[in-house]
Amino acid sequence: MADIDQIMQHDHERLDQLLGQSAHAVSTGAWQEAAHLLEVFRHGIVDGHMMVEESTLFPAFEHKEGGDDHPLTALLRKGHRDLRIFFEEMAEAIQDQDAETFDDLLSTVQTILKQHDAKEETELYPYLAAALPDRGKAAGKRILADETETPS
Amino acid sequence: MSEYRGCELPEDLFYDLDYVWLRPEDDGTLTIGITDPAQTMSGRLQKARIKKIGTHLDAGRHVATLESGKWAGGVPVPFAGEVIARNEALLEDPHLINVAPYSDAWIARIKPDDPQHALDNVKIGPEAIEALEAWIKRYDVQCMRCSE
């Protein structure tokens, strides 16, 4: 099995694709499909990816770095809080069939994700892959299990 | 005016202890903006979207979204209410937020659904300033004053 940095980076790419598919459905007016795809994306990122990070990876980093108030994980946790609200607002825009609002939110969310993911991929995951005894494989298993369970 | 690591923190405003400041107005509305440390962390702002007048927002929802070259994020409202005014100047020149976050760059005015409890989740005075100083330290922010 791959190390945690490779697994998490792959999950970022998978989630980006899901969000892109939902956006495409919005652009073609397929509102029901867009709502379904956004929910698949939301479940994957909030209940899978973020959950593993907040329950396992961030605490592991903070434990190694000597405290739970580290600027890196504080910033990443804040990013998660902001994103959760944006995902709710995107779902509401789809419910209202409001493509203009959805596109505005999508632009902001994609910018946040690009910066957030880059920070994790350059500063967090490589550190944990090197620092954890199993190179993060246990946490990686949870991500891979979630990917398998993702509804189509 | 308190100052910490170069960040201005007016003592007469209410804060959500994260990004947002609030100022109660005489007509019962509340003006919202983002703090000096928040604008510093965001970088030079290049885009601002503010919800239209008449939009109703639940507590915690974003009244605006802001983007710089290195950052994007929302401006959450700590209470439910209706947008009754927005700062149109920011739509043309979002960088104004980096220059005058507490004055010319107010973002919106909101009429709370429940004026009695609109400020229940925000802080003012020494308690707020102390928490904001901890915020500045946590995110390792050093404020720089923009002049243009």
Image: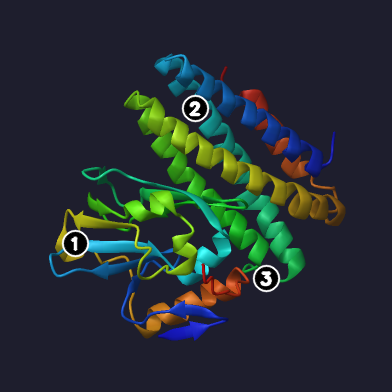
Chain letter of mark 2 equals A
Q: Amino acid at mark 2?
A: Leu
Observer able to see residue A29: yes
* Residue highlighted by disc 3: A67
A19 lies above or below A54: above
Q: Residue at x 38, y 85 (%)?
A: B126
Q: Is residue A57 left or right of residue B7?
A: right
Label 2 element class: helix
Q: Is residue B26 left or right of residue B123?
A: left
Identify the mark nearer the N-term, 3 or 2. 2
* Residue highlighted by disc 1: B29
- Residue B66 lies, in percent from the top left, at 47, 51
Label 3 element class: loop
B116 lies above or below A80: below
Taking depth in this image into account, of A90 and A56 the one nearest to the observer is A90
Taking depth in this image into account, of B19 and B39 the one nearest to the observer is B39
Q: Amino acid at mark 1?
A: Thr
Residues under labels 3 and 2: Cα distance?
35 Å
Q: Tell me the crowding category of disc 3: few under 14, some 14 to 19, or many 20 or more residues within 10 angstroms, Cα based.
A: few
Residue B127 placement: quadrant:
bottom left
- Residue B146 lies, in percent from the top left, at 54, 70
* Residue highlighted by disc 2: A38
